Image: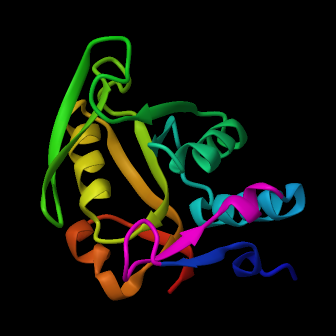
Amino acid sequence: MMKIEDYIRNIQDFPKEGVGFKDITPLLNSPEAMEEATKRLLALVGDKKVDRVVGMESRGFFFATLLAKELGAGFIPVRKPKKLPFDTIAQEYQLEYGTDILEMHADAIKPGEKVLIHDDVLATGGTAEAVCKLVERLGGEIVQLNFLMELSFLHGRDKLKGYEVKSLLSY
């Protein structure tokens, strides 16, 4: 069985000193590893009905679009401010030092639609929590949050209590 973690490169002191960055570009460079990761992410979803898959800028886009295609669902990008061309809703969230904002198109989700949220990594949970708020403001029902990997020592799940959270890998 293929080990997905063999395709994730550790880069020390990136983007700043003291940070160990999990680089997924070797995974993206291997069609076999991408296919295997996609199959395993789909297995995490199981037989849940999904109408929309939300992917977070930017590394979340890679697998979110593949999941949407395989699930027969629409894909919704969540981006930094001023990157989406139509009317948007915004959600501020906390960073280690300060705040940031995420946006989604205001017409991306209809009330009652079943939504899968995907990102490459669950770290502190701030980004995922903000995306949950955006989805729910539009009336979407979050069926699950999916992550390629989780940095469990950062306790991101603590911000996502009440949601089903799954990841392929945990560090």
Along the line of sight, the residue nearer the viewer: 116 or 46? 116
Along the line of sight, the residue nearer the viewer: 63 or 143? 63
Instruction: Point out the image quarter for the N terminus.
Output: bottom right
Along the line of sight, the residue nearer the viewer: 62 or 164? 62
Is 92 situated left or right of 146 in this image? Answer: left
Residue 110 coordinates in the image, percent (x, y): 34, 24
Residue 77 coordinates in the image, percent (x, y): 45, 33
Is 84 situated left or right of 81 in this image? Answer: right
Q: How is the image coloured?
A: rainbow
Q: Which residue occupies 23% across, 77% down? A: 158
Q: Which residue occupies 41% across, 68% down? A: 122
In the displayed image of the protein, which residue is found farthest to the left? 98
Q: Which residue occupies 21% across, 69% down? A: 159
Q: Quadrant of residue 109?
A: top left
Q: From the viewer's perspective, is residue 160 above or below residue 12?
A: above
Q: Which residue occupies 58% across, 45% down? A: 64
Q: Quadrant of residue 18?
A: bottom left
Q: How many marks?
A: 0
Q: From the viewer's perspective, is residue 117 above or below residue 148?
A: above
Q: Magenta stretch: give its range.
A: 13-29
In the displayed image of the protein, which residue is found farthest to the top? 86
Is 96 situated left or right of 143 in this image? Answer: left
For residue 167: magenta? no
For residue 24: magenta? yes
Residue 127 coordinates in the image, percent (x, y): 29, 55
Residue 120 coordinates in the image, percent (x, y): 52, 60
